[in-house]
């Protein structure tokens, strides 16, 4: 029964993704529950894409592999920025103030100049 249910919802979600309706409109048109449609959309999308590829895992990340299989998770990120300053003649404290830092739970730290494109940083953080 569960396989039939999954097949039915797989077809419904595929139909939804090829139409120009919102989730709410599609659910109303098909006479199905909006929240159940949303549940299956997210469930099937999650099942269809790997969270971490095997090639991307290094031996040092082996312990993190288990938590990655459990699903996505949010991690705290602290973005430090300051007003753009001239880099000429900046002392040690001036250099620290003109950097953006991306700190990962593993302790890894990436620093970028204060003017770095935020879309680039978001894409980088999402890829890591």
Image (cartoon, grey):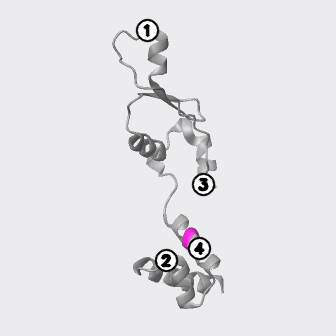
Q: Nearer the viewer, residue 66 or 101?
A: 101
Q: Is residue 1 magenta?
A: no
In 3D space, how far apart are the residues under numbered discs 2 and 1 (Cα atoms)? 54 Å
- Whether the residues at callouts 4 and 2 have beta carbons within 8 Å, the answer is no
* Mark 1 or 3: the one toward you: 1
| Bounds of the magenta segment | 38-42
Q: Secondary structure at mark 3?
A: helix
Element marked by disc 2: loop
**Side of 104 where 21 appears, left or right:** left
Residue in the foreground of this view, choosing between 114 and 120: 114
Residue ID for mark 4:
38
The dominant secondary structure in magenta is helix
View extreme (left): residue: 88
Q: CA distance from mark 1 to mark 3?
A: 45 Å
Q: Label 3 near label 2: C-beta < 8 Å? A: no
Label 4 residue SS: helix
Q: Mark 2 highlights which residue? A: 22
Label 4, label 2: how many angstroms apart (C-alpha)?
A: 11 Å
Chain-order first, disc 2 or disc 3: 2
Please tell me which residue lies in front, 4 or 103.
Answer: 103
Residue located beneath label 1 in the image: 91
Foreground label between 3 and 4:
4
For mark 2, does the 10 Å Cα neighbourhood hold few (<14), some (14 to 19), or many (20 or more) residues? few
**Residue found 65% across the figure and 82% down from its top:** 2
Picture coordinates of residue 10, whole percent (x, y): 52, 80
Q: Are marks 1 and 3 in contact (CB under 8 Å)?
A: no
Q: Is residue 94 above or below residue 112?
A: above
Of mark 4 and mark 1, the one earlier in the sequence is 4
Task: Report the mark closest to the observer, 2 or 3.
Answer: 2
Among the two numbered marks 1 and 3 on one chain, the one whose residue lies closer to the N terminus: 3
């Amino acid at each position: 029964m569960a396989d039939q249910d999954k097949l039915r919802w797989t077809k419904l979600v595929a139909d939804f993704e090829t139409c120009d309706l919102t989730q709410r409109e599609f659910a109303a048109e098909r006479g199905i529950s909006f929240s159940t449609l949303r549940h299956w959309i997210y469930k099937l999308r999650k099942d269809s894409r790997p969270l971490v590829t095997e090639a991307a895992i290094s031996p040092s990340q082996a312990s993190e592999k288990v938590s990655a299989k459990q699903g996505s998770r949010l991690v705290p990120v602290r973005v430090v920025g300051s007003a753009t300053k001239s880099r000429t003649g900046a002392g040690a404290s001036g250099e620290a103030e003109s950097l953006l830092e991306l700190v990962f739970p593993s302790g890894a730290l990436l620093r970028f100049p204060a003017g770095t494109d935020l879309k680039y940083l978001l894409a980088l953080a999402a890829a890591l």
